[in-house]
Amino acid sequence: MSESINGMKRTHMCGVPTEKDLGTNVVMMGWVQKRRDLGGLIFVDIRDRTGIMQVVFDEQACSPETFTKAESIRTEYVIAVAGPIIERDEETVNPALPTGTIEVKASELRILNAANTPPFFVDDEQVNDNLRLKYRYIDLRRPDMQRNMMLKHKVGGWVRQFLDGEGFIDIETPMLTKSTPEGARDYLVPSRLHTGSFYALPQSPQIMKQILMVSGFDRYYQIVRCFRDEDLRANRQPEFTQIDLEMSFVTEEDVMDLNERLVAFVFDRALGVKLPVPFPRLTWREAMDRYGSDKPDARFGMELHDISDIVKDSDFKVFASVVAGGGTVRAINAKGGNRELPRREIDSLVDIVKTYHAKGLAWIQVEEEGLKSPIIKFMTDEQVDAILSRLDAEPGDLLLFVADTEAVALTALGQLRLHMGKRLGLIDEKEFNFLWVTDFPLVEYDADAKRYVALHHPFTAPKDEDMDLLETDPGKVRSKAYDMVVNGEELGGGSIRIHDTDVQERVFKALGFDHEKMWDQFGFMMEAFQYGAPPHGGIAYGLDRLLMILLGVDSIRDVIAFPKVQNASCPLTQAPAPVDPVQLEELRIEVIEDEEE
């Protein structure tokens, strides 16, 4: 039997009643959104997570004590009110609210808690982010934030519903694990019982979920917290939530098929959007050549073109020398861009490509009366015509060129393509364009470390047909990896994993590990493979990033209840913070202060 609060028991949430409830006596509890005193009448909007209900205190109808208390309440007071639901007067109807045609005629009022004047009001949209996060408990009262959190809860439920129906088992993996420094930095946790030793918070459950496949569970999933000590940006936080799954006895196609159906299921439930499946597939090579990105936004065209063969013998030395030195010349056609962009804005585009280490940007303006460009005088008519033909150029177009190493040219022009797509209004923000990027390189060369590093992680299986290149030319080895991309954002990434100890050793050697190092860091996993490991693969999604896409918000902070700011600190709790010296002494840790410069 539940007890009453201050003599009253809640019967209805604020946003639930409708006109069908006219005449019903209700008790509601919530926060004061707004109070309007009209003399003998006081109107109070009371709010909870379901919505807002208007309450009217009539001096002629309620007790003097109740009316006096109503005069004293202010914004964000927590109150309980009782009374019948009545129809609003026609002049007070609010069509913007679901409850806008009804109100509660108050007969009783309890002030459950008074409130200080808040640093900002819940309906104020122009609030500094740091202030919002410092007083996050007030910010989270905003209807938009509560909508975001409730959708996140529902998405988690739909994911569980789908995966449960596909035979997956939800299994927890450790939060305190071994540091394996391949990838982002680990968050380390000192051990009191093992002096000088540390746990690491997991960047993902990668190793453990593979061991679960060795353990015979066949299909695992988890909605799990992950931790990475890396620089923050709009879609990245040091701690985040991941939808993690792994499957035994599967191919790439099996994993991609199941996850297309999972995402389509969630989008249907969340937005009523029917995603067309299967999603298009692009190899990593195709994605880079066509879009200059391994997470391409394919909602618009403006694809990249290689014109190296056309300009390699031209008198424009910038192009010719780059090609002669093993580089490339790539171009895009910003359709209609010459009409839309003034010359000074065209000149400023060079700043964009320089951000991505390109040395410069060339351009051709295509006009009815001819071409305008400082570079065409160094080319023959045949070379110019070949460029115009390859780029399908017509009057009004703006052709943009980057000459550099392949990596720089593709990345810089790919980013310029995105800028121009937004600048020219070519992107349909209501469209959801899903695709898969496959066949990633297994490794990439790290010039600072002077060795190859895993592009995804060191447990990704190489393509069978490329295995012989592991020892001779690892940079050319393709992997059985796949990323799900939507609107230029990586939503999830995964791969078929290595399940053979010999192959895993070969990959580690390609990454510069000697036998001792690989067995010291990953020996427990490699030993597990020797006791019968099935072929297996999986994928992991960023749940927070998925919510960003579903809700159309720009910052991951808007889908996490208590996020960190740019320097990975929490304005609400002031974490990270110093700890008691006694705790440090127990852990045998000495803090060395930074020397003053």
Image (cartoon, helix red, strand yellow):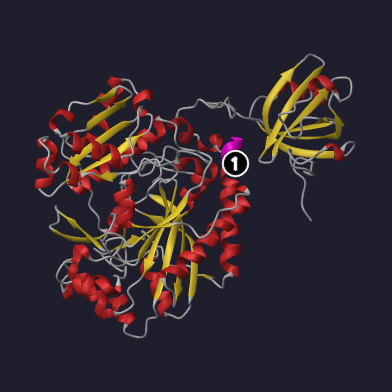
Determine if residue 283 is in view. Answer: yes
Counting from the top left corner in percent of width and height, residue 260 is at: 51, 60
Counting from the top left corner in percent of width and height, residue 133 is at: 46, 36
- Please say whether residue 573 is one of the residues in the magenta stretch: no
- The residue sitting at 46% across, 30% down in the picture is 131
- The residue sitting at 19% across, 38% down in the picture is 383
Quarter of the figure with residue 522: bottom left
33, above or below 319, in the image: above
157, above or below 563, in the image: below
- The residue sitting at 70% across, 25% down in the picture is 73
Counting from the top left corner in percent of width and height, residue 514 is at: 15, 72
Residue of label 1 = 146
- Please say whether residue 146 is one of the residues in the magenta stretch: yes
Front residue of this view, candidates 398 and 596: 398
In the visual, does 70 lie left or right of 469? right
* Dot 1: element: helix
Front residue of this view, candidates 561 and 27: 561
Determine if residue 561 is in view. Answer: no
262, above or below 310, in the image: below
Q: What stretch of residues is rendered in magenta?
A: 141-147
* Residue at far bottom of view: 531
Counting from the top left corner in percent of width and height, residue 445 is at: 18, 57
Q: Amino acid at mark 1?
A: Gln
* Residue at far top of view: 39
